[in-house]
Image (cartoon, helix red, strand yellow):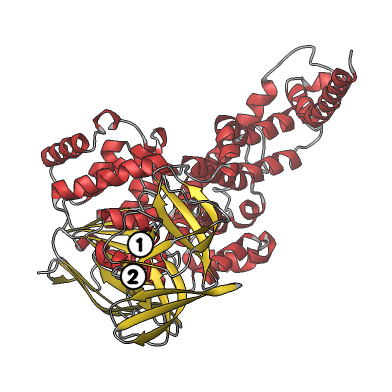
Amino acid sequence: MPILEIEHLQKSYGETHILHDINISIEEGDFLVLVGPSGCGKSTLLNCIAGLEPISGGDVSIAGRNVTGVSPKDRDIAMVFQSYALYPTMTVAKNITFGMKVRGVDKATQDAKLAEVSRQLQIEQLLHRKPGQLSGGQRQRVAMGRALVRDPALFLFDEPLSNLDAKLRVSMRTEIKKLHQDLNASIVYVTHDQIEAMTLATKIVVMKGGVIQQIGTPAEIYNRPANMFVADFMGSPAMNLIPARVRVDAGTTRIEIERKDEAPLVITDPVARDLPAEIVLGVRPEDIHEATEGAHLPGNAQRADRDVLIDIVEPAGADTFAVTQLGGKPVTARLRAESPVQARRPFPLAFDLSKVSYFSPKDGQRLN
Amino acid sequence: MTSNTMLRWGLYAVLIVFAAFYLMPLFVMLTTSLKSLEEIRTGGLLSLPREITFAAWSEAWSTACAGTQCEGLRPFFWNSVLMAVPAVAISTVVGALNGYVFAQWQFRGANLFFAGILFGCFIPFQVVLLPMAQTLGFLGLAGSIPGLIFVHVIYGIGFTTLFFRNYYVTIPQELVRAAKVDGAGFFRIFFAVFLPLSLPIITVSVIWQFTQIWNDFLFGVSFAGPGSQPVTVALNNIVNSTTGVKAYNVDMAAAIIAALPTLFVYVVAGKYFIRGLTAGSVKG
């Protein structure tokens, strides 16, 4: 039984359509991340799941029960908000137990739950403080505590880490992941940060303009993006999207990439592929390899027929990024830290063609 | 002395002059109320009393004649208390609920409603005198304290709604959403989340309303009956109904007595007044 099932959900404000035909289904224990640029409708979708926004069409079911039109308090959900939304005049303890108090849970159970959750989140020493006396990270924990005590069928997180500084964000991310594993909780999580999405999710929904672009595991989304938007949005540095021409003859595929003031770069794939004449070659920076004499190449890496001129070299500690210009676009290669690559010098590169994505330049859809 | 400190002393001098100028009437009132009539006739306006006497105060409070009734301000003072306290309380509570709805529970046509209520703040008192008199007659409240309470509540709601709405609009909507998910309803959220945040704006509303209602003369003189006149109307009558020698000391004492409650409210809650007008949001 899916813990959350959304069927043909529509949302519009008057004539403005915010969400178009959303269909999502997740199982118990899934960590679903809704990711997309701002204004893509991900937060609206979360509010629709919570029942804080009425939907214009379709159905929402939580734990097998159709909750379309049911008020938020009766949906068996708990929510963590971007601003934490702690009640400013209540102590941490009162904040956490407010929901139980409203629902008439007896005092002994409240106390037991409070003790359990505050131990879990290590906020026992903060219980008598007001939210104004807490740091950002502590408020974040209290907000999570308020959700955890409720023990709901589904947790909803609305960009919970976006107000924290970078370092704290990473450590809280790890804690949320640990919490998910320990509790086997079902979670829907909204973020605009693709790294958060990749690290936390068991399932990712990429959205743009109120339309779902792709649903899949982090690996599927990363390795086989459904279209150029997903390819570009997920991954950092982003996937290189290089316009190219394809020629198939005698069982091989020749991929030709235009270059400024130079002969086209040609990569030959020994396998004949069923591709149109014009494509966009999508290749992740880590799938472009250094092809110097004696360099170790993965089995499927194909050397380009000529060296390319490197424009910029960016050492980043663990890796060195080399940027060149191919097909009129800057192309980044992730090379090893000790790579001999130098700026304004030609350098040999190889492309791992088993990992590349091919897209149609017309509609941006995946071809392979 | 540098030019900077000279400037500073100059500034203080100017401020002191202005303050003295502003306080002069109060000084005259206070000193005059403590003099005997004899001394008022012979002494100067600004001179301090040679002999302090509270006779004028006790006369103003309990025996001065307002029209034909010679019981001083006392019965009218209590009329004012009986009118102002419920009127302030009711208009503040209604304003708080109104403001809560306008700020956090948007409904269709809310802006139109709010504009209407706001418009109510700017209707001059004189305009509503006749229709209000008819309304009070229709409700059977004419000439009574409940009638005055009714008028002041109606007139005050525009302001109190504006105060509370502008205060609550700074409270993030996510707070209401969180409380909704927690299972709380409309009134629960108001009492558990919003009301505890409202002390500064309640103070503003109370001071404003109390000052307005206590000091009101026009509604009092128009709508009150013989037994329900507020202190402002009685003060006017006392000052106007003296015969023969004008008892300035009694008039001054009566005026101070009539003004004391608003002064008291401001002194007690004044710092919250400023804070409530300027501060708004709940910084999380």
In the image, which disc is placed on residue A356?
2
The front one of B145 and A260 is A260
Task: Report the residue marked by disc 1.
Answer: A287
* Secondary structure of the residue carrying numbered label 1: helix
Mark closer to the chain start, 1 or 2: 1
Kindly identify the residue that appears in the image at 55 percent across and 56 percent down. A345
Residue A271 x %, y %: 28, 79
Residue B146 x %, y %: 48, 53
Looking at the rendering, which quadrant does residue B186 occupy?
bottom left
Chain letter of disc 2? A
Chain letter of disc 1? A
Kindly identify the residue that appears in the image at 11 percent across and 41 percent down. A109
Q: Are dots 1 and 2 in contact, CB under 8 Å?
A: yes
Task: Work out how far the residue at label 1 is from the one at label 2, CA to CA, in angstroms.
Answer: 8 Å
Residue A45 x %, y %: 33, 68
Looking at the rendering, which quadrant does residue A363 occupy?
bottom left
What amino acid is labelled 2 in the image?
Answer: Val
